[in-house]
Amino acid sequence: MLENLVGHSFYYFLDGMSGCFQIFISPEDKDFTCPYGNFAYPRIPFGLCNALATFHRCMTNIFADYMGHIVEAFMDDFSVYGESFDHCLKNLEKVRNRYEETNIALSWEQSHFMVT
């Protein structure tokens, strides 16, 4: 991942808002029973075994055609890069459009733009 980031002039660092809470659990997998009663998580909660790995796998699938070319992902953090200001801005637009298409929210307060 770091090898793909080296050599570019401009970067955006985007933070996925509450990463795991954005991934729905399939209906047949969400119900479970324990000594305290029956429960059903509608979305993946933090703290479950493999929750972050599942989120990362979902993000990798969503951005598969961009990975290694304009974006890199680590857990719920994304790095968008480009050789020039305009190129990086176009790449950010592509990534932002993909976020909107898939209804994934970003934490704009924790994101950093046009880092050189």
Image (cartoon, rainbow, N blue to C red):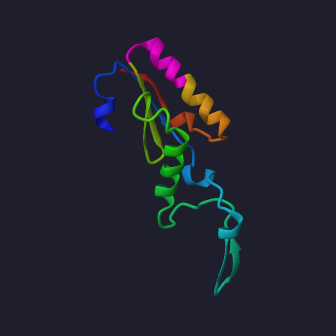
Q: Residue at x 50, y 18 (%)?
A: 89
Q: x, y (%) of residue 68? A: 39, 33
Residue 54 in picture, x, y percent from top left: 51, 56
Q: Residue at x 57, y 49 (%)?
A: 18
Residue 98: within the magenta? no
The vertical placement of 92 against 42, above or below, is: above
Where does the magenta region start and end? 83-92
Q: Position of residue 83 (x, y in %)?
A: 37, 16
User: Image check: 35 left or right of 66?
Assistant: right
Q: Seen in the image, is 83 located left or right of residue 66? A: left
Is residue 89 highlighted in magenta? yes
Q: Name the outermost residue toward the bottom.
A: 35
At 52% from the left and 18% from the top, the residue drawn is 90
Q: Dividing the image into 4 quarters, which one contains the C terminus?
A: top left
Please state, as top left, top right, bottom left or bottom right, where the N terminus lies in the image: top left
What secondary structure do most residues of the magenta stretch adopt?
Answer: helix
Relative to 52, does residue 16 appear above or below in the rendering? above
Q: Is residue 43 left or right of residue 74?
A: right
Q: Residue at x 46, y 41 (%)?
A: 77
Q: Is residue 11 above or below residue 44?
A: above
**Number of marks:** 0
In this view, the residue in front, 18 or 1, is 1
Is residue 46 rendered to the left or right of residue 11?
right
Q: Quadrant of residue 81?
A: top left
Residue 22's spot in the image, x, y percent? 62, 50
Q: Quadrant of residue 71?
A: top left
